[in-house]
Image (cartoon, rainbow, N blue to C red):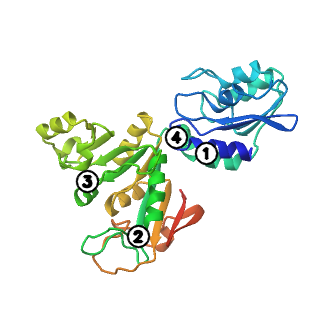
Amino acid sequence: MRRALELAAQGRGHTSPNPMVGCVVVKDGRVISEDYHHRYGEYHAERNALSHCTEDPAGADLYVTLEPCCHYGKTPPCTEIILEKKIGRVFVGAMDTNPLVGGKGVAILREHGIPVETGILEAECRAQNEVFFHYIETGRPLVVLKYAMTLDGKIACESGDARWVTGEVARRHVHGLRGYYRGILVGIGTVLADDPLLNCRIPGGRDPVRIVCDSSLRIPLDSQLVRTAGDLPLIVVCAQEAGSDAEKAWSLEAAGVRILHSPGRQVDLSWLMETLGQEKIDSVLVEGGGTLNASLLQEGLVDRVYAYVAPKIVGGAGARTPVEGQGVARMAEALTLENREVLTLGEDICMTGRVRK
């Protein structure tokens, strides 16, 4: 199962909104095939592995990180090929909570006389597909807050200069996150201040869907985001009651920008997450400023945090911080992270964890 988890990880960033899944086929103590789910819309791990065994897999053991599917979607059900190849036993990491599966895959195999053991390295298998399980169980994307700050908690100098807070190793790690999470979200303040491109700049990485909260459609037509909208998806979210320039909206759409109209005078962030979920965007990396970060945290929408900390001190009473807004009144009310992990990235460190709800 540990080998199956290693295989599954090779699909990272390319299977969304499907899960990452790995599969190993063992006969007489020998691995006769192994594979994983490579890309959304292509064959699943079990079918990939069973299609190129080095010998007849009849009677073999099959290890898979997620319960085999039993329904027709973009590909045939995996239970079908497991039965067809006369697999002897099946070992499952985590059960699939998708209502289309939800125990039915295991039930079908058992009904046909195949012994199935579940819960093998279940915690590791669920953790690997944190995005999938969150999305399938809530209908909303997993919201991941990312920021980089100095040792004294600043994301920029008082002058506004922010290049660069962290070093190259940490910045490369961020691009790995961009290649993994399906969407990337910023506020209009970040666009006006930095003119970002918000793409993934690592070999083989997948560019995220770029999303901008912009209540009054202030995004410049000559910004990098708009100029590349024909090649990289860009969604601009404005507020219905804020009023917008119809000619500006037309120009944005002509450039390839998709405009979403949120109810209210400001972008309704809860509505936005529901809408993105309906668009099959299963995860969103937030790279905004302190105002957007504070709003998301205040509304309880953040699920995970990546906080990069550089060994630098810049000072400045007016220098920006990662989370602004009013904040909490008492330390006991502070949000805390659980299931924490600390990474060393060159000279910088990164703490990540789930927000305790």
Please name which of the two marks, 1 or 4, marks the residue nearer to the observer: 1
The CA span between labels 2 and 4 is 29 Å
Check the image and name the residue furthest to the top. 84
- Secondary-structure class at tag 1: helix
Tell me the quadrant of the picture where the N terminus can be found.
top right
Please name which of the two marks, 2 or 1, marks the residue nearer to the observer: 1
Say whether disc 2 or disc 1 marks the residue closer to the N-terminus.
1
Residue 206, percent from left and from top: 44, 43
User: Mark 4 sits on what residue?
Assistant: 135
In the rendered view, does 69 fall on the left or right side of 289?
Answer: right
- Residue 188 is marked as 3
The disc labelled 1 sits on which kind of residue?
Ala
Residue 39, percent from left and from top: 53, 34
Mark 2 and mark 4 in contact? Answer it, CB < 8 Å: no
Residue 84, percent from left and from top: 75, 18
Q: Which residue is at 59% across, 43% downward? A: 10
In the rendered view, does 208 fall on the left or right side of 30?
Answer: left
Say whether disc 3 or disc 2 marks the residue closer to the N-terminus.
2
User: Mark 1 sits on what residue?
Assistant: 9
The disc labelled 3 sits on which kind of residue?
Ile
150 relative to 337, above or below: below
Please name which of the two marks, 1 or 3, marks the residue nearer to the observer: 1
The disc labelled 4 sits on which kind of residue?
Tyr
Please name which of the two marks, 2 or 4, marks the residue nearer to the observer: 2
Say whether disc 2 or disc 4 marks the residue closer to the N-terminus.
4
The disc labelled 2 sits on which kind of residue?
Met
| Residue 328 visible somewhere in the drawing | no
Crowding near the residue tagged with mark 2, few <14, some 14–19, many ≥20 C-alpha atoms within 10 Å: many
User: Mark 2 sits on what residue?
Assistant: 149
